[in-house]
């Protein structure tokens, strides 16, 4: 019997969530793109490490620390001078793996937003993504989007003329199978009124989700791959077919030799008393995960 002892997604995100790509996937650009804006792919010691878009200039400064780390410092300026300064993730490397992108993804303001990416290091973790945006009150603020293995991509996923930030849903990594065996569905974020917003359930993303299903084989062909089955079911749930997907998995008895350890009270299994630990099969564990992560509504609720 294969046995998967599950650690909650939050722990995986902090402790284990490939060498992530450094920042956005767009090539270095000097002219703004209507959706992608303008990009600095990676900090360079020779500089100038600056971007300008719509009257806003952003730059990265390298701050040397007493513990021999280097911290990227992101600085935003308008015509009147500096408006915001914030730190990214300290680097233990002899170089600074930091990048940034100025984009217009918030339709409430003509000012661009800054997406800052700095790398935490590690075999399977992470790009720290921060977003600096102008609030409705006219104040520049920085927001932590989170830690993401694999970085991010900006593109117009819902075809509304403004870009969305696509990341992999970190909660699927390691949860059902090994890292390399996982196929996390995407999550999409944007900025509205100066605040990052998760728009993954936007109906306008349905064509995007439909196209991503082509990356998967049929459930029966993936019967021994719980990590890929979970990703497939997540996308099916985004398309409003989550219950049907789970029923299909139950019917063909996929991953029947895999069990997961959970806590009876729903808490983290590593904090659970032995007497409260339970073993469940793949499909009920997947259902609970989809509910917890907002892909499905809990059954029995009106």
Image (tube, rainbow, N blue to C red):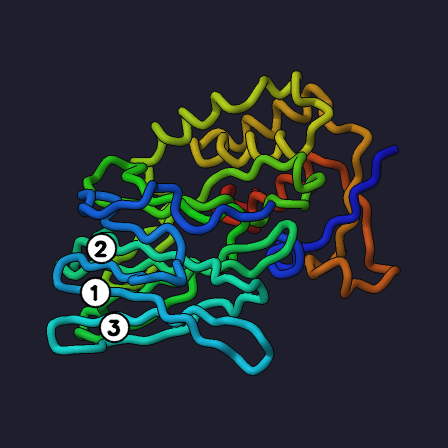
Rendered image quadrant of residue 16 = bottom right
Q: Earlier in the sequence, mark 3 or mark 1?
A: 1
Q: Residue at x 81, y 45 (%)?
A: 279
Q: Earlier in the sequence, mark 3 or mark 2?
A: 2
Horizontal and vertical percent for residue 202?
33, 42
Image position of 161 (left or right of 178) = left
Q: Secondary structure at mark 2?
A: loop
Q: Are marks 1 and 2 in contact (CB under 8 Å)?
A: no
Task: Judge the density around disc 2: few (<14), some (14-19), many (≥20) Cα neighbours within 10 Å.
Answer: many
Q: Earlier in the sequence, mark 1 or mark 2?
A: 1
**Quick one: 8 or 12, which is closer to the camera?**
12
Structural distance between the alpha carbons of marks 3 and 2: 13 Å
Q: Which residue is mark 1?
A: 57
Structural distance between the alpha carbons of marks 1 and 2: 17 Å
Which-is-in-front pick, marks 1 and 2?
1
Q: Which residue is mark 2?
A: 106
Task: Judge the density around disc 1: few (<14), some (14-19), many (≥20) Cα neighbours within 10 Å.
Answer: some
Image position of 138 (left or right of 265) = left
Horizontal and vertical percent for residue 248?
61, 22
Task: Judge the density around disc 3: few (<14), some (14-19), many (≥20) Cα neighbours within 10 Å.
Answer: some
Q: Residue at x 26, y 56 (%)?
A: 102
Q: Which residue is mark 3?
A: 140
Image position of 241 (left or right of 208) = right
């Amino acid at each position: 019997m294969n046995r998967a002892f599950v650690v909650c997604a939050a722990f995986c995100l902090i402790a284990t969530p490939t060498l992530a790509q450094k920042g956005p996937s767009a090539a270095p650009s000097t002219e703004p793109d209507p959706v992608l804006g303008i990009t600095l792919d990676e900090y360079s010691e020779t500089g100038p490490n600056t971007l300008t878009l719509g009257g806003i200039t952003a730059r990265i400064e390298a701050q040397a620390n007493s513990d021999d780390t280097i911290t990227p410092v992101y600085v935003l300026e308008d015509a009147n001078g500096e408006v915001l300064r914030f730190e990214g993730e300290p680097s233990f490397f002899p170089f600074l793996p930091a990048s940034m992108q100025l984009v217009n993804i918030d339709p409430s303001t003509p000012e661009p937003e800054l997406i800052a990416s700095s790398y935490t290091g590690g075999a399977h973790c992470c790009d720290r993504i921060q977003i600096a945006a102008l609030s409705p009150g006219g104040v520049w603020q920085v927001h932590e989007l989170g830690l993401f293995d694999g970085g991010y991509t900006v593109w117009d996923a819902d075809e509304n003329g403004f870009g969305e930030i696509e990341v992999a849903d970190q909660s699927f990594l390691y949860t059902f199978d090994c890292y390399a065996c996982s196929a996390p569905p995407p999550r999409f974020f944007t900025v509205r009124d100066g605040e990052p917003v998760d728009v993954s359930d936007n109906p306008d993303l349905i064509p995007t989700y439909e196209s991503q299903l082509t990356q998967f084989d049929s459930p029966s062909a993936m019967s021994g791959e719980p990590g890929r089955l979970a990703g497939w079911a997540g996308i099916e749930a985004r398309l409003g077919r989550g219950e049907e997907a789970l029923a299909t998995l139950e019917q063909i008895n996929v991953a029947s030799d895999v069990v997961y350890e959970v806590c009876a009270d729903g808490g983290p299994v590593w904090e659970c008393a032995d007497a409260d630990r339970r073993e469940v099969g793949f499909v009920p564990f997947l259902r609970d995960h989809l509910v917890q992560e907002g892909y499905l509504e809990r059954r029995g609720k009106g």
